[in-house]
Amino acid sequence: MSFLVSYTLKDEAGFDGQVSAMEALVADLKAAGIDGLDYTCFSTDEKTEFLGVLEFRDDAVKKAFIDSAAFAAYRDRVGPTFANPPQTRDIFKIASTKD
């Protein structure tokens, strides 16, 4: 199962903080060693818009991510900078060079 997450900041002033928070989230998730989780984040040409791709092997991995200290720290750090809650869509992998 995979999700595409769209994040929109209140204003461009939060750009560097969001980049730093995403880098910290990835480092913390790597340190947590949640097997079966892949998370990749992207900025866009709009300084207020970011995308994340979350891939979970199964529901247990998804729960481990949601319950992780890394995700909690990220939410606490950047939640107040969002213009609205992140928008999540289910996406379905067809093929990948990671496979």
Image (cartoon, grey):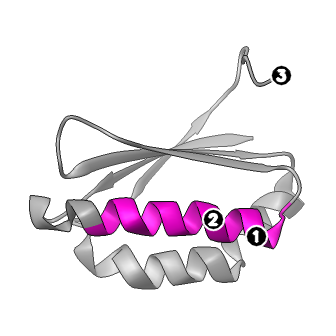
Asked if labels 2 and 1 touch by Cβ distance under 8 angstroms, the answer is yes
Q: Residues within 10 Å of mark 3 (few under 14, many from 20)?
A: few
Can you tell which of label 2 and label 3 is closer to the viewer?
Answer: 2
Q: Distance between the Cα atoms at labels 1 and 2?
A: 6 Å
Kindly identify which numbered label has been placed on residue 99.
Answer: 3
Amino acid type assigned to the residue bearing label 3 in the image: Asp
Q: Quadrant of residue 32?
A: bottom right
Q: Residue 10, image x and y in percent?
A: 15, 65
Amino acid type assigned to the residue bearing label 1 in the image: Ala
Q: Which quarter shows the C terminus? A: top right
Residue 85 visible in the snapshot: no
Kindly identify which numbered label has been placed on residue 27.
Answer: 2
Which residue is nearer to you in this view: 38 or 93?
A: 38
Residue placed at 83% from the left, 59% from the top?
A: 61
Residue matched to label 1:
31
Name the side, left or right, on which 6 lies relative to 14: right
Q: Which quarter shows the N terminus? A: top right
Q: Residues within 10 Å of mark 2 (few under 14, many from 20)?
A: few
Amino acid type assigned to the residue bearing label 2 in the image: Ala
Asked if labels 1 and 3 touch by Cβ distance under 8 angstroms, the answer is no
Q: Residue 18, image x and y in percent?
A: 33, 64
Which residue is nearer to you in this view: 77 or 92?
A: 77
Name the side, left or right, on which 49 lies relative to 32: left
Q: Distance between the Cα atoms at labels 3 and 1?
A: 22 Å
Q: Is residue 13 above or below residue 75?
A: above
**Label whose residue precedes the other's in the sequence (2 or 3):** 2
Point out the stretch of residues depicted in magenta: 17-34
